[in-house]
């Protein structure tokens, strides 16, 4: 990905609104938008993310300049984007990193047949970098120790109720997540109605109160960024890794503390579904510097151990 932009068009204001500022980006012809931006989607009905039949991906984000909507698609080997709202220019400036311009897939050397085969089948995978910490941190906290179904529902409800409609001609039902101050002012009973227990809601409030310091982590290297995020009580290695993978595009920040990932990695690389975090890190040691990419390729391979127990039953505290 070359990451070279043509001269930037002049912003124009019309009747108090902003015209979209088009921007195009030279990119590898095999860039896969779905694979690259897919980790930013929190469930099929995420109000901040939409993939449309024309191949476009829409994102509604809370940027340092305010809310913004980004539409991006790949046409003829080039990424084309438009953005609306106060955060439009910020989103367009961050487009190369979002599409993986700062990622170097050539640094990855497959050392297992399964990973090599998946790597060849998925040449369009790039590790995205959003540059936005809170945007990834809050939904990651919501996913702590609950099913994804529960977490996605909570995220959807809270964003729609306390966020704001996405600027511009975004698809119907898209919203920008609340700002940091709004997260701190959500009443306890509304967290309860959203099926979020007191521990997770308190963690989100604590994080929102120091949002400015957390956003600084987007400019740090992986370990330093995780250390900064983990200063907030209630945020541990699992949550920090899930956050920094997205905000920083960190290729080596593998998720530990996950209920399923160690067993999946162990099954794929050693035929052992009982693998724990320590053993998983040992198996991934040959990929040091690229362990997150290796884990993603394993997940994309579909080579997972057969299920031996029913799915975890979703919890519901709203009626308590």
Image: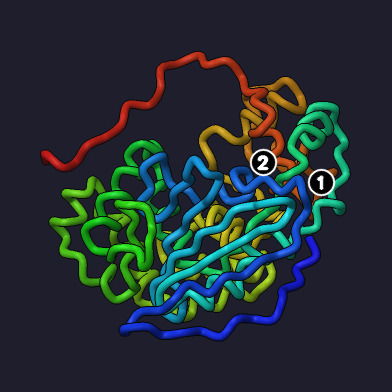
- Residue 113, compared with residue 281, is above or below; it is above
- Residue 317, compared with residue 158, is above or below; it is above
In the picture, the disc for residue 287 is 1
Q: Is residue 279 visible?
A: no
- Residue 73, compared with residue 296, is above or below; it is below
Question: Mark 2: few, some, or many residues within 10 Å (few <14, many ≥20)?
Answer: some
Instruction: Locate residue 127: give its quadrant.
Output: bottom right
Residue 267 in the image: state x and y as whole percent: 69, 24
Q: What element carries label 2?
A: helix
In the picture, the disc for residue 181 is none
Q: Name the residue under label 2.
A: 296
Residue 257 in the image: state x and y as whole percent: 55, 44
N-terminal of the two: label 1 or label 2? 1
Is there CB contact under 8 Å for labels 1 and 2?
A: no
Residue depicted at x 23% and y 45% = 195
Residue depicted at x 84% and y 48% = 108
Residue depicted at x 66% and y 33% = 300
Q: In this view, does 162 lie to the left or right of 142?
A: left
């Amino acid at each position: 990905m070359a990451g070279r932009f043509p001269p930037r068009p002049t912003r124009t204001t019309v009747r108090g609104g902003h015209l979209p500022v088009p921007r195009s980006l030279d990119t590898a012809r095999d860039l896969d938008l779905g694979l690259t931006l897919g980790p930013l989607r929190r469930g099929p009905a995420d109000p901040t993310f939409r993939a449309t039949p024309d191949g476009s991906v829409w994102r509604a984000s809370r940027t340092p300049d305010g809310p913004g909507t980004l539409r991006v698609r790949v046409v003829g080997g080039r990424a084309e984007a438009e953005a609306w709202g106060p955060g439009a220019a910020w989103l367009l400036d961050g487009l190369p990193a979002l599409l993986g311009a700062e990622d170097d897939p050539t640094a990855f050397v497959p050392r297992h047949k399964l990973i090599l085969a998946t790597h060849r089948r998925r040449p369009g995978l790039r590790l995205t970098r959003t540059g936005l910490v809170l945007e990834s941190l809050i939904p990651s906290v919501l996913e702590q120790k609950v099913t994804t179904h529960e977490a996605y529902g909570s995220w959807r409800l809270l964003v729609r109720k306390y966020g704001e409609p996405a600027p511009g001609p975004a698809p119907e039902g898209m919203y920008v997540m609340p700002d940091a101050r709004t997260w701190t002012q959500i009443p306890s009973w509304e967290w309860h109605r959203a099926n979020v227990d007191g521990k997770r809601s308190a963690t989100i409030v604590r994080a929102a109160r120091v949002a400015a310091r957390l956003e600084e982590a987007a400019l740090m290297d992986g370990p330093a960024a995780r250390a900064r995020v983990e200063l907030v009580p209630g945020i541990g290695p699992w949550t920090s890794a899930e956050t920094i993978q997205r905000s920083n595009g960190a290729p080596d920040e593998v998720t530990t503390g996950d209920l399923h990932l160690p067993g999946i990695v162990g099954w794929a690389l050693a035929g052992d579904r009982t693998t724990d975090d320590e053993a998983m890190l040992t198996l991934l040691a040959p990929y040091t510097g690229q362990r997150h990419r290796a884990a993603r390729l394993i997940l994309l391979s579909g080579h997972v151990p057969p299920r031996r127990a029913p799915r975890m039953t979703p919890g519901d505290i709203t009626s308590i």
